[in-house]
Image: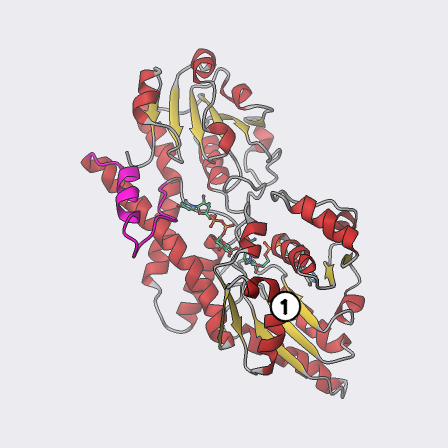
Amino acid sequence: MIGAGYVGVVAATCFSDFGHTVCCGDSRPEVVLALESGVVPFSEPNLKELLEKQLRSGRLSFSSDLGYLINFADVLILSVGTPSLDDGTADLSAIEAVAKFIGENTNSDKIVVVKSTVPAGTCEQVEKLILAQLTRRAAHHRVSVVSNPEFLREGSAIVDFLQPDRIIVGLETEEVGAIMKSLYAPLLREQTKIIFMSRNSAELTKYASNAMLALRISLMNEVAQLAEKVGADIQSISLGVGADHRIGSKYLSAGVGFGGSCFPKDLKALSAVGKQNSIEMLLIDATIAVNSKQRTLLVNKASAHFQNLKGLKCAVWGLSFKPDTDDIRESPAVAIVNLLLHAGVTVSAYDPVVKKLPNIDDLSTKKFQIVKSALDAVKDADMLFLLTEWREFMSPDFHKMFKIMKQPVIFDGRNIWNSKSMSSRGFTYFSIGG
Ligand code: NAD
Ligand code: UGA
């Protein structure tokens, strides 16, 4: 496994749990050192326990020596990052660097599995890069490149990896299919579907899946805006729409918009690839536009309520892009904190796991602080913004909150509380789409 981030560590640990001998490598030696000693450098439920168990089994190891790693195994799985470039396209430099390195260093036949999210045509490009180096060295090793996109979610990564709805494998030569089946053997015994297709189709299946989920969220966010105007309630609407089994109930929750390291970057990449191919990706662009607008909604509501936000104090609950992770990449909460700071608001934030925000614009102005508890955050606050629906926020001590807030005004960006009961407790309560 090459790339020890969220995907690499989870996949390496689970493949070891399947009985395979796995070595996972990364170009950051400090990450490898931590993992070798059983420390997970990010927050993911149940991962530490599984990591420690697999380290004890002797099947799982870590290395920052990529030369060693390349010749450790017959199957090389690439899980390096593919972040957005300024023009929205996926930055494939890490994938390309690893491909070149494999070509330069492999001393036997290899199956190279691309697990990172990459545009259609990347596996073909990876194969070309490896073959070019083999030709240069006059080496005659056979290399097959396979697409095997990953669908796990942060916060439930292990369960998702061990119980996937499907395993997608894109390949050009049939014989590699048997090896891919043996890689996932325990899951296939449990009837998980493995779907074989061409590499380009597999690569695009990943983007289409993320786009479909993001599109559902943006659709509900757009309907939520209309619901507010016409006196309807988006939560009832979600229930009603989701009850249709052709639609299903998942990914229909309106809120402050989607974030994370994947939906925003993958939608941008899909739109950019469309343009490169002279296809205007109208739905993808609209999904992105609705999501950007959604991030401004709560601050606009606060401006309308208070007339002037300058000088007010706001408590923020939740900074990660979703619960059960410390990931703040493209977090709507971080974007909203920045909007508040730019409006002259002082922000006191609390999150169960995020204890610092490295990329916040106005840190130096001392108008932003992260405090130790949810109640510390709301003390003397003129308003509370609920931005990530962590379980511990579901049933807070409302009585105490009411007493210690300067003004009992709540903006619930994830619709976790009930409008009627909040009003009966004396709060002025705003939610999304209700
Ligand atoms: P990440 O940023 O957490 O991890 C990537 C790792 O790759 C880092 O540790 C980095 O140091 C390492 N790396 C970069 N260049 C390297 C090189 N040349 N050699 C060795 N290591 C190198 O990323 P992630 O969240 O694990 O995502 C990885 C890929 O999987 C991305 O394409 C992403 O879109 C996709 N994906 C992510 C998720 C998710 O939930 N995070 C889910 C499915 C798919
Ligand atoms: C997403 C996909 O769900 C995974 O299948 C995929 O593998 C991954 O991206 C990826 O490609 O990396 P993830 O970003 O970890 O997973 O998290 P999700 O649970 O999908 O949530 C994404 C965002 O959508 C979060 O900000 C969440 O708050 C938001 N969301 C989700 C909503 O606003 N409403 C919903 O109904 C569901």
Q: Residue furthest left?
A: 230
169 or 34: nearer the viewer: 169
Q: Is residue 357 magenta?
A: no
Q: Quadrant of residue 228?
A: top left
Quadrant occupied by the C terminus: top left
Q: Quadrant of residue 361?
A: top right
Residue at image x 77%, y 66%? 69
User: Ligand 1 is in which quadrant of the figure?
Assistant: bottom right
In depth, the one of 369 and 48 nearer the eye is 48
Nearest the eye: 373 or 420: 420
- In the visual, does 71 lie left or right of 409? right
Residue 192 point in image, percent of width and height: 51, 63
Name, please, the residue furthest toward the front: 189
Describe residue 239's horizontal placement relative to residue 277 as left or right: left
Q: Residue at x 56, y 38 (%)?
A: 360
**Is residue 253 part of the magenta span, yes or no?**
yes
Which portion, as a residue range, is magenta? Answer: 231-254
Badge 1 is on which residue?
Answer: 183
The answer to whether the beta carbon of the residue marked 1 is less than 8 Å from any atom of ligand 1 is no
The residue that appears at 43% across and 61% down in the rendered structure is: 209
Main secondary structure of the magenta stretch: loop
Q: Is residue 20 visible?
A: yes
Q: What amino acid is found at the position of numbered circle 1 in the picture?
A: Leu
Residue 134 in picture, x, y percent from top left: 72, 83
